[in-house]
């Protein structure tokens, strides 16, 4: 028999065997770890006292046939291994036990496979749609030093495989959260991923896997042919044929730029598909692929997850509602006819403006035209700008800015549901802008015109317009305003007050990055809302890309007003996250310290 000095330092004395036999159960604290001891069928068992589900103490639980049952939600665990029979609860940690000279010694060696365990639990949480499991896994993985791209990629892979409708709102929210990470406090990064991953799990609930369509058995197709076929099949709503063209392009190593060109061309062959969602989903899918692929990779289609992610976009493209079929785009003004005439002029207009690129200055009245009541004047203004040397990106940015002003000037006398009518053109225009930064093609340029017409159609939402905050309304200490923002968003009907506070902060010289960090934090404490997340991410991107910070103030005002219009919520998802965070931190949520045995 070894002496105590010969025993491994990880072995810690817990109690005497006689004491445990007399009581049947004991609660001890070893190295700050509460451990429940059980004596059953002449064996000693030691497990973590906290139920891994929600932290309720297992000491005092019923133990029968080698199974202990938590008395709160009735999760059942194998005493020997800690394995659970109810996967929503997670396995409880068990500790090796040695009995020596009538004393119980517990091996408290730290676990060395936590990374693998939490990666598997994230997968389990997605498969079973359990937000608490997702939250605990993400918090643990990031705390272990895992890059945020890893859980993001797990969600991306899962969401594109298990989804009846293909790429949808959950994957878009996940990618929005990934894009927002640079703006967040470090402590909010796992919270953002939790929100996005939980949205993916919700969308995928009960969905069968998507079965792969194999590429064509050829190596001799060129990009021009594949692009033409893809557009033709999308036009005919032939999902399977279009998907086969797309996966063939991936298999043949068609470049990332050309893949994007194919998708954006098909998305703008028809007008404003699904009120802008289709093109926004395409843009987000491409950004998701960028996020999971190391930046040093070349231009060939070597995106990780490329085939399943790109294939998930086809259903939305093929099945989308086309606005040329909607009466609002035909009557009383035939916007489609105006657009088709403008599209015919685009090649010549771009050629004329080529020599003047870099010299164009935005006319003072241009924004007023875009926000005006003459659809033909809007189309003509866009063409004149291109003819005068305006670049595709400049034009897309101005239209996106005009769409943001619609939200910033949205009057609260409008029906609450009309917030979405103002929101859709903005996020669509932002997707077009980000797409044009990637691939400035004449086909995608049509999306700028579509966005401008969608802004035109919503002009009634600014009748009368909500007044933009006055730039002269400043304070000496802008940082004090940020402290008031959380309380403001704890109350309903604070849209205008929130917009004024944000503008006052910025006009007073406040730090825009600090403001965006606070706005994102306040968004994340609410129950997730697809449009709120879209709006916030689009506003942050647009503001960051504008060269004039004063010009960008209405953009962040728009984001803040939209958030205020949808807050406060029940915040039940934040409660779930806080539970996961406190469990991970080791907080003693429900334990009775008086019942512990002093192991010393």
Image (spheres, rainbow, N blue to C red):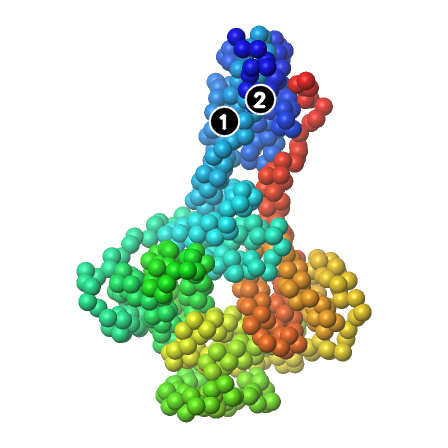
- Would you place residue 322 above or below residue 178 in this image? below
- Would you place residue 337 above or below residue 32 in this image? below
Identified at 53% across, 58% down, the residue is 177
Front position in the image: 30 or 169? 30
In the rendered image, residue 535, in percent from the top left (x then y), is placed at: 56, 66
Is 318 situated left or right of 66 in this image? left
Q: CA distance from mark 2 to mark 1?
A: 23 Å
In the rendered image, residue 290, in percent from the top left (x then y), is placed at: 43, 61
- In the picture, the disc for residue 491 is none
For label 1, the crowd category at 10 Å Cα-Cα, with few meaning under 14, some 14 to 19 and many 20 or more, is many
Of all residues shown, which one is farthest toward the right? 476
Front position in the image: 319 or 258? 258
Identified at 51% across, 70% down, the residue is 427
Front position in the image: 455 or 39? 39
Image quadrant in which you'd find residue 563: bottom right
For label 2, the crowd category at 10 Å Cα-Cα, with few meaning under 14, some 14 to 19 and many 20 or more, is few
Identified at 51% across, 10% down, the residue is 42
- Would you place residue 305 above or below residue 535 in this image? above
In the rendered image, residue 475, in percent from the top left (x then y), is placed at: 79, 70
Q: Secondary structure at mark 1?
A: loop
Residue under circle 1?
Answer: 82
Sequence-wise, which precedes: disc 2 or disc 1? 2
Q: Secondary structure at mark 2?
A: loop
Query: Is residue 319 in view?
Result: no
Residue under circle 2?
Answer: 9
């Amino acid at each position: 028999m070894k002496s105590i000095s010969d025993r491994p330092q990880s072995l810690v004395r817990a109690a005497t065997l006689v004491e445990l036999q007399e009581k049947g159960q004991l609660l001890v604290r070893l190295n700050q770890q509460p451990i429940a001891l059980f004596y059953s069928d002449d064996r000693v068992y030691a497990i973590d006292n906290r139920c891994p589900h929600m932290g309720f103490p297992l000491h005092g639980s019923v133990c029968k046939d080698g199974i202990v049952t938590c008395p709160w939600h009735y999760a059942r665990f194998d005493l020997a291994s800690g394995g659970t029979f109810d996967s929503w609860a997670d396995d409880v940690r068990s500790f090796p036990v040695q009995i020596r000279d009538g004393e119980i010694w517990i091996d408290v060696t730290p676990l060395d496979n936590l990374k693998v365990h939490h990666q598997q639990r994230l997968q389990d949480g997605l498969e079973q749609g359990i937000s608490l499991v997702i939250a605990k896994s993400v918090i643990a993985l990031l705390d272990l030093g895992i890059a945020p791209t890893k859980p993001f990629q797990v969600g991306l892979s899962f969401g594109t495989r298990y989804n009846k409708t293909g790429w949808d709102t959950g994957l878009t929210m996940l990618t929005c959260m990934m894009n927002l990470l640079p703006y967040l406090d470090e402590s909010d990064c796992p919270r953002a991923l939790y929100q996005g991953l939980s949205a993916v799990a919700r969308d995928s609930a009960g969905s069968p896997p998507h079965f792969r369509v194999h590429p064509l058995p050829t190596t001799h197709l060129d990009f021009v042919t594949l692009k033409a076929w893809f557009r033709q099949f999308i036009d005919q709503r032939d999902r399977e044929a279009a998907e086969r063209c797309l996966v063939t392009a991936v298999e043949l190593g068609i470049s990332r730029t050309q893949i994007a060109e194919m998708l954006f061309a098909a998305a703008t062959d028809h007008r404003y598909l699904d009120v802008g969602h289709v093109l926004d989903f395409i843009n987000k899918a491409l950004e998701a692929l960028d996020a999971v692929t190391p930046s040093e990779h070349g231009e060939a289609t070597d995106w990780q997850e490329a085939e399943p992610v790109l294939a998930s976009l086809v259903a939305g493209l093929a099945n989308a509602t086309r606005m040329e079929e909607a009466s609002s785009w035909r009557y009383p003004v035939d916007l489609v006819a105006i657009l088709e005439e403008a599209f015919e002029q685009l090649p010549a207009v771009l050629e004329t403006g080529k020599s003047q690129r870099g010299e164009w200055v935005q006319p003072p009245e241009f924004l007023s035209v875009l926000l005006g009541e003459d659809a033909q004047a809007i189309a003509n203004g866009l063409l004149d700008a291109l003819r005068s040397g305006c670049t595709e990106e400049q034009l897309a940015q101005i239209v996106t800015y005009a769409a943001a002003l619609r939200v910033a000037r949205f009057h609260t006398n409008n029906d609450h549901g009309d917030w979405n009518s103002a929101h859709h053109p903005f996020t669509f225009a932002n997707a077009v802008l980000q797409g044009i930064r990637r691939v400035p093609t004449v086909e995608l340029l049509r999306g700028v015109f579509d966005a401008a017409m969608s802004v035109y159609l919503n002009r009634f939402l600014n009748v009368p317009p909500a007044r933009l905050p006055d730039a002269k309304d400043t304070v000496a200490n802008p940082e004090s305003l940020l402290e008031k923002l959380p309380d403001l968003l704890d109350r309903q009907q604070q849209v205008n007050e929130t917009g004024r506070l944000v503008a006052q902060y910025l006009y007073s010289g406040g730090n825009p990055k600090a403001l965006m960090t606070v706005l994102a934090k306040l968004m994340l404490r609410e129950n997730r809302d697809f449009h709120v997340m879209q709006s916030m991410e689009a506003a942050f991107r647009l503001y960051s890309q504008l060269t004039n910070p004063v010009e960008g103030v209405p953009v962040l005002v728009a984001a803040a007003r939209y958030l205020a219009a949808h807050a406060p919520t029940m915040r039940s998802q934040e409660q779930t996250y806080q539970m996961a965070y406190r469990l991970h931190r080791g907080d003693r949520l429900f334990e009775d310290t008086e019942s512990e045995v002093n192991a010393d």
